[in-house]
Amino acid sequence: MDTSPFTESELTYLSSQHLGRLATVAPDGAPQNNPVGFVYNENLGTVDIFGFNLGATRKFKNLRSNPNVAFVVDDLVSMSPWEVRGLEIRGVAEPLGDADPPLPGMSRQVIRIHPRRIISWNVGAQAPGMVGRNVADQPRVA
Amino acid sequence: MDTSPFTESELTYLSSQHLGRLATVAPDGAPQNNPVGFVYNENLGTVDIFGFNLGATRKFKNLRSNPNVAFVVDDLVSMSPWEVRGLEIRGVAEPLGDADPPLPGMSRQVIRIHPRRIISWNVGAQAPGMVGRNVADQPRVA
């Protein structure tokens, strides 16, 4: 795609991290929160989540009743002083049934996150502190 | 307290990790997901979350309309083969206004999580794979 929802600093950060945490909401209104691997899909500007039996998981099923997700990728830079950096990606997610997985053995289901709002902490030299933006407001050139 | 909702292996794991991720649900039904520091409160059997201006945060306010939370503490043991270990703690959380913070400079607000269901992956030698239990079903001796 011509534009990415992420800045170059954010893409560099995302590629440096291997584990993210995906929050979904169950039909009863309670959240769940799961560690997952992820891939940035540069063709679509989405974050794609794969797994070993993803279609059978509750997080996959939760999306049918509530497609809203919050996906966070972060790390602890320093304990003293306390400093966390990372990205929270809020958006809507599609549970899809037939994608090519990035690793052999993973199932063909994918959770495809379309970012709607991106909140960053200390990612990129030009963005100290917490910065949030709506994706529609600020498409970025990739 | 006489009993802990966590096993000894789980308490050892929790004390080895410094950052967790807290999922809450906003009034519109969408989740948010935030990296936070945490303390296990052995007197109450709760997980207590502090912060620098916690009372002003959306996650703190979200609890007033929906007290359900999912808190995950995890780490990536190996990328090849892919192996994640960790705990997801689902429960109800109280936004409290006057607690002694564990670090100077933190605010006196606390998010106090009462565990209702604990799901673990590869934590403790006797629990390979994913294991879940309801807290009321299996109180553990601390």
Image: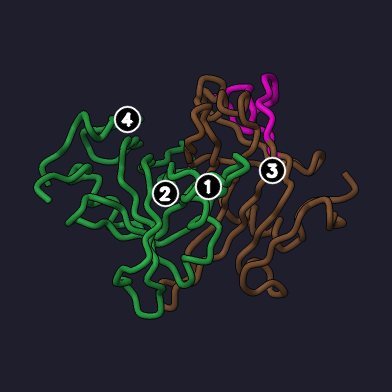
Chain colours: A green, B brown
Q: Are marks 1 and 3 on the same chain?
A: yes
The image quarter in which residue B92 lies: top right
Q: Quadrant of the C terminus of chain B?
A: bottom right
Residue B104 included in the magenta stretch of the image: yes
Considering the numbered disc 1 on the image, is that residue within a helix, a strand or a loop?
A: loop
Amino acid tagged 2: Asp
Percent position of residue A32, x then y: 57, 48
Question: Can you identify the residue that label 1 sits on?
Answer: B19
Q: Quadrant of the N terminus of chain B?
A: top right
Amino acid tagged 4: Gly
Mark 2–mark 4 distance (CA, rounded to whole Å): 18 Å
Question: Can you identify the residue that label 3 sits on?
Answer: B91
* Residue A16 numbered tag: none
* Range of magenta residues: B93-113
Q: From what the image shows, is residue A127 above or below residue A14?
A: above
Amino acid tagged 1: Leu
At horizontal 60% and vertical 32% (from top left) the residue drawn is B50
Local crowd at mark 2 within 10 Å, few (<14), some, or many (≥20)? some
Tag 1 and tag 2, C-beta contact below 8 Å: yes
At horizontal 54% and vertical 44% (from top left) the residue drawn is A25
Question: Can you identify the residue that label 2 sits on?
Answer: A75
Residue most extreme to the right: B2
Main SS of the magenta part reads loop
Tag 3 and tag 4, C-beta contact below 8 Å: no
Mark 1–mark 4 distance (CA, rounded to whole Å): 21 Å
Q: Is residue A16 left or right of residue B76?
A: left
